[in-house]
Image (tube, grey):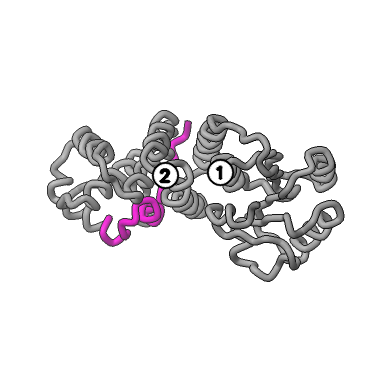
Amino acid sequence: MEMKEYSIKEIEEFTGIKAHTLRIWEQRYGLFNPKRSSTNIRSYSDDDVKKALNINLLYSNGWKISKIAALSAEDLILEAEKIVGESGKSDDQQLDFIIRYIVAFDEGGIVDSLEELYQEKGLVQTYTDVLIPLLVRIGNLWQVGAVSVAQEHFFSNILREFILLKTNELSINEGSPKMVLFLHENEMHELGLLMTQYFLKEQGINCFYLGAKVPTADLKKCVQSVKPDYLLTSFVSRIHKDQIRAIVNEIATFFELKNLIVCGYQVEHNPTSFPEGVKKVKRITDLPSFLK
């Protein structure tokens, strides 16, 4: 596999350490030895990224940079792992460490980190405190080319399987309200909907999960068969308000809008795009107030 090279700006994006500071640490302490182009442009390796993340972890926990510079490569990793192994880690530290696992394609490290967070916070709080900021940061890193599509998909699939595993451990509460969860046929961002399903099942709601890219005609057939008390969908991808209105108006031909719940990025940032009667939710923890 061809090794990716990173610019100093990408290292800054990964770690939060300013490019100016990275140059000083390179020149004064010899912490990095990047390749240089004919025009003196620095480029860094995957190992440099991991090293920078470990340095940042120690530095943000009170280590002096001179002391960090004196560590061997092996000791740097050991000291970073000690910090992660200690109780009371901050969410930012957890985020940095998971990113290191993503860069290394380390499935075991990612799963262990998710399980530790789950045991400490529960899944909903983990998603709110750590995973949403992590997904935003991964998106930013992908935008500048610091995280590849393969790395992004690798992590997303692991996270999806983890959420499903925890959801399947919950019992179904027979006789509770029925809710169909779906994404419209042009929407494929599913993680938020999966987390919503987990939260609702935890609250005892009987969920029917249809997933992403559901044609409206198929949704209609499901509604006719299941006869749900509620429908819930999420609008994440960029979409024009006229398209949202068209989707909702079509749903209105076979389901009462007063029992349609919408959430997601577009709900928060386009608050006037939805027809009257639709229930708009910014946080999944607000959902119980909308349910009977």
Q: Secondary structure at mark 2?
A: loop
Image location of residue 5, percent across then percent down: 42, 44
Which residue type carries mark 2? Glu
> In the image, which residues are magenta?
1-22
Taking the image as shown, residue 236 lies to the left or right of residue 41, namely right
Q: Residue at x 28, y 40 (%)?
A: 84
Q: Is residue 106 left or right of residue 217?
A: left
Q: Residues within 10 Å of mark 1 (few under 14, many from 20)?
A: some
Mark sitting on residue 203:
1
- What secondary structure is found at the residue carrying circle 1? loop
> Mark 2 highlights which residue?
5
Can you give x and y, in whole percent of width and height, for residue 197 in the image? 60, 42
As drawn, the label of residue 267 is none
Asked whether residue 246 is drawn in magenta, I would say: no
Q: Residue at x 42, y 51 (%)?
A: 129
Q: What residue occupies the far bottom of the structure in this picture? A: 272
Q: Are marks 2 and 1 in contact (CB under 8 Å)?
A: no
> What residue type is disc 1 on?
Gln
Q: Is residue 8 magenta?
A: yes
Tally of marks: 2
